[in-house]
Image (spheres, rainbow, N blue to C red):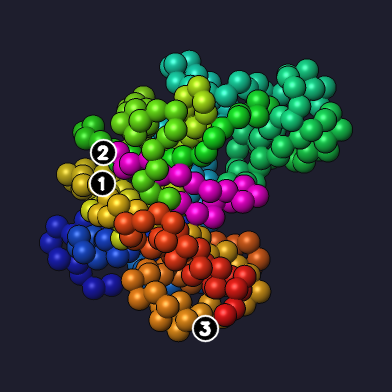
Amino acid sequence: MRELPVGTPRVGIIGGGQLARMSQQPAIALGIQLHVLADSAGDSAALVIPATSVGAATDAEAILRLAEQVDVITFDHEHVPQEIVHALEDAGHAVYPGSEALLYAQDKALMRRRLGDAGFPMPRWAVVTSAAEVASFGQWPLVLKASKGGYDGRGVWVVSDETQAGDVMSHDLGPGAVWIVEEMVAFTQEIAVQVARSPHGQAVAYPPVRTVQDDGICVEVIAPSAPHSTGSEEAEELALRVAKELGVVGMLAVELFDTPDGLVINELAMRPHNSGHWTIEGAVTSQFENHLRAVLDLPLGDPRPRQSVAVMANVLGGEHPDLHAAFKHVLARDPALKVHLYGKGVRPGRKVGHVTALGEDLTSTRERARHAADYFQGVIDE
């Protein structure tokens, strides 16, 4: 391997998905060397980051070898066993977010208890072990969640009676996971606020965004989008307080329900997040650059939007495996559109890319992003 220039920061990322992939561009600009541990050489990030090792996120030896080659370890996803993160820290390696913070992105029950005890707004919830306990919790419909392992709608079920609850709870949760029942929150919209926080405590918040879900998967993000129940400053302050309370270093996404009575915390993610992809073109400093700055304890970048409106639409796998065949139409129709493909094979419902449109008018900007995503997905073909 070619010798790096003196002082080149080296960041190891566990996981080779699109979040690691999209970290490469700001790393190039900042002169940072990324080293990724991917499940396979064909993973999204492995296709564009030369320094890639192959190994599972549960492979302690592979992760230790990665840590010995870099200055700091961070994550493309949260599914790294706590015992491995503890072992890295015990060996003196810098890991961000650290084990004590990461725990609350890995286990929803622990997150609910910790933030609830600290006075943060949470849905009414309980740990349950049977369908009968679910039935006694409250009025149907109710939400059942696996405390560990869920993402993109997986691990979350809406149940309308005890029979449905029993069917769901017949699933094997895996080691250490428990069942959680939650009230069905009557929200007006779902929003997310992202925070970047560094080891010495500097923190910046991006403006709240509205996230639009379809079958539990985020399909669209509208930025900025103030909560109906409170102002943007209050939402940003809530997310900043969560980051400080949990000692998060790096990016934190706080997903929230906006209700007539105020904001309620839904989920946390301690990494760059789908709700922040709009920041690549739409903010002065992207979430990916600020994540790298944060884990290296560099001064954080400006999170303010560049234009009045940014709309990001996810491209989900559809019927057409050749995504590049859509480029001529999409880019000719809208030369200002920004397209990001993740180098993934197309499977129905899989996130294979996203498009971002910037503008001054929400209606037209949203239509531009939606048209492009629908064309990539084969929903429209004119």
Distance between the alpha carbons at the discs numbered 1 and 3: 34 Å
The local crowd at label 3, few if under 14, some if 14 to 19, many if 20 or more residues have their Cα within 10 Å, is few
- Residue drawn at (84%, 28%), measured in percent from left and top? 162
Answer above or below: position of 125 versus 306.
Answer: above
Q: Vertically, is 302 above or below 363? A: above
CB under 8 Å between discs 2 and 1: yes
In x, y percent, where is residue 308? 30, 52
Q: Is residue 362 above or below residue 195?
A: below
Q: Is residue 218 magenta?
A: yes
Q: Position of residue 54 (x, y in %)?
A: 48, 64
Tag 3 or tag 1, which sits nearer the N-term?
A: 1
Q: Which residue is mark 1?
A: 303
Q: Residue at x 57, y 80 (%)?
A: 382
- In terms of image quadrants, where is residue 232? top left
Which secondary structure, mark 3?
helix
Sequence-wise, the earlier of marks 2 and 1 is 2
- Residue 374, magenta (yes or no): no
Looking at this view, name the residue that lies furthest to the left. 6
Q: Quadrant of residue 181?
A: top right
Alpha carbon separation for disc pair 2 and 1: 7 Å
Residue carrying label 2 = 204
Q: Please state which amino acid type lies under the numbered disc 1.
A: Pro
> Magenta region: which residues?
204-221
Give left or right: position of 106 versus 100.
Answer: right
The N terminus: image quadrant: bottom left
Which residue sits at x=48%, y=59%? 313
The percent position of residue 22, horizontal first and vertical second, equals: 37, 62
Horizontal relation, residue 79 to residue 126: left or right: left
Residue beneath disc 3: 325
